[in-house]
Amino acid sequence: MKFKLIGLLLISSLFGCREAIKNDVKFVAEQDFEDIQFTEPKVSNSLVVNTKEDLLGYWVGDFDANLSDEEMDTIYGNESYSNLITRKITFSIDEIKGDSIIGHSISAGNISPFKGLLSENTSGFTMEVDEFKKTKTDGKFIIEIRKTDSILKGNWEAYSQSELKIYKRNFDLKKKLFVYDKAQELDVTFFDTDKSKEYVYATDTVDGKVEEYIDNEYYATTEKLFEKNASNEVLTTDFVSNLSKADIFILRNSIFARHGFAFRDKQLRMYFEQFNWYMPVFGDVKDELTEIEKENIDLLLRYEKNAEEYYDTFGR
């Protein structure tokens, strides 16, 4: 079921899991795909490409903006666009039939099927790949890789260039084998840069007038986030009841991250992309959750709504 994205199916899932998906920051249901099916890649274990079969599988790396200096200046000057400059992409080559290549790309939670042509010569392979033009974020990939190499290099251009701030990107992607590992840990604090409040951090008297210095505190996790692994051990009510709202939110979503879920939410995506182990691969992982994870999700959801919010200065 990892490769079938049907919004209606999510409604009929098991109760505990259904609630998790409904609350899991847009999950799959808010994506616009009516019925997209992917063939599971017949992944070759070789991380170096010598034959076209070695191309099958998941290629992961940074998806970097490729614009003029003038265009980049307009983005650097606007904080709301800064997260667009670099993002992670998973380029999944699912099937090769003769000179045809079929697969899907995942970036910022957008899952786009593609198809194209594969060419082979004595030195390597080239690919020209078109996403299915379903959304404004779809485009065309031009890719090459030399034989005995392990890096897919290329560029991407959007079809609807006038509708996007960043309409051209380039990339160097490495092949990765997705393996679920329940022991993967969180060791970075989460800050929601879109959710903050002001506080007075200092006062001073200047010419007899009191001046206040204002800064921002951001919705954040606490150190308790690092005490437990929600995929590896059963959480207790005593522990969860003492967590902040953000602690619960991130602990719950860490379960989905370990299973390779591709987050659409900007804050979750930016947070989990800091971890080398995180690999956005799937749009639906509900059938992969373990019994411990389902139990923990249910417990975390019961406390999340009424948990106290915690704010901290950025970079503490």
Image (cartoon, rainbow, N blue to C red):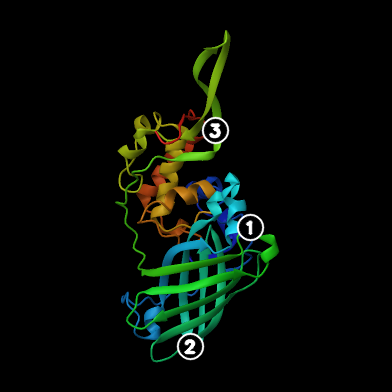
- Answer with the quarter of the image where residue 221 lies: top left
- Answer with the quarter of the image where residue 314 lies: top left
Few, some or many residues within 10 Å of mark 2 (<14, 14–19, 20+): some
Q: Helix, strand or loop at disc 3?
A: strand
**2 or 1: tag closer to the N-terminus:** 2
Q: Which residue is drawn at 58% across and 56% down?
A: 72
Q: Helix, strand or loop at disc 1?
A: loop
Of badges 2 and 1, nearer the viewer stands 1
Q: Residue 196 carries which label?
A: 3
What amino acid type is highlighted by mark number 2? Ser
How far across and how far down the image is residue 80, in percent?
Answer: 59, 46
Q: Residue 165 carries which label?
A: 1
Q: Residue at x 31, y 37 (%)?
A: 227
Q: Residue at x 65, y 68 (%)?
A: 134
Q: Helix, strand or loop at disc 2?
A: strand
How far across and how far down the image is residue 194, in percent?
Answer: 56, 40
Q: In this view, does 294 lie to the left or right of 306?
A: left
How far across and how far down the image is residue 117, in percent?
Answer: 53, 85
The correct choice, above or below, for 233 with respect to 31 in the image is above
What amino acid type is highlighted by mark number 3? Ser
- The residue beneath circle 2 is 119
User: Which residue is situated farthest in the right direction here?
Assistant: 162
> In whole angstroms, how far apart are the C-alphas of marks 1 and 3?
25 Å
**2 or 3: tag closer to the N-terminus:** 2
Between 269 and 291, the one nearer to me in the picture: 269
Q: Residue 40 carries which label?
A: none
Few, some or many residues within 10 Å of mark 3 (<14, 14–19, 20+): some
- Asked if disc 1 and disc 3 are in contact, CB closer than 8 Å, the reply is no
- Please indicate, yes or no, whether residue 166 appears anywhere in the rendered image: yes
Q: In which quarter of the image is the C terminus?
A: top left
Q: Residue at x 44, y 31 (%)?
A: 244
